Structure formats: structure tokens, C-alpha cells
Amino acid sequence: MTNPNNNKHFNDEALRINRILKRENDALSHIVDEFEDFLLNYFNVLNDEDDRVVGRLQDLIINARSRAND
């Protein structure tokens, strides 16, 4: 037979860990968004010779963002 007190403690601890992980994930997502914005803005000031590479990187960022919003 299981001890209900241990189960409650286990559930409370799991919820606490999930809240911590969500806060960390949200903070990291914000940092990634800022970095992507920086790159997209930086790409706009590069020379035309870099257009192919810049276009590919922009496509990668846009595709990653669209998958994250699904």
C-alpha cells in the first residue's frame, strides 16, 4: 500500500520543479528571440555579396520561429 503523504510530497516537488523549468525555459526563449532579432537586423546592413548566406540564415530563423508558434 502506498503512503499518501509521500505521494503528495512527490507531486508537490514535481510541480515545483516544473515551475522552475518553465521560468528558465521562458528566460532562454526570450534570449533566443533577442539574438534572432539582432541577427535579422544585422543582416540588413551587410553588403550585397553576402545575400545568399544572409537569406539562408534568415530563412532558418523564420522557419524555427514558425515551428515554435505551432
Image: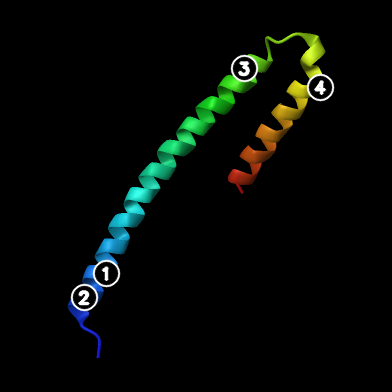
Q: Residue at x 66, y 33 (%)?
A: 61
Residue at screen point 64% across, 45% down: 67
Residue lying furthest left in this view? 5
User: Which of the two discs, 2 and 3, sits closer to the camera?
Assistant: 2
Q: Residues within 10 Å of mark 3 (few under 14, many from 20)?
A: few
Question: Which of the 4 quarters of the picture holds residue 1?
Answer: bottom left
Amino acid carrying mark 3 in the image:
Asn
Separation of marks 4 and 1 at Cα, in angstroms: 53 Å
Which label belongs to residue 41? 3
Q: Is 59 placed above or below 66 here? A: above
Front disc: 3 or 1: 1
Calculate the distance from the C-alpha at mark 3 to the C-alpha at mark 4. 16 Å
32 on left or right of 46: left
Amino acid type of the residue tagged 1 in the rendering: Phe
Q: Amino acid at mark 2?
A: Asn
Q: Tell me residue 4's x, y (percent).
A: 21, 80
Q: CA distance from mark 2 to mark 3?
A: 52 Å
The quadrant in which residue 24 appears is: top left
Where disc 4 sits, the SS reads helix
Residue position for label 2? 6
Real-space CA distance between mark 2 and mark 1, rounded to the nearest whole angstrom: 6 Å
Q: CA distance from mark 4 to mark 2?
A: 59 Å
Q: Residue furthest bottom?
A: 1
Q: Please give the label number shown on residue 10.
A: 1
Amino acid type for the residue under numbered disc 4: Arg
CB under 8 Å between discs 2 and 3: no
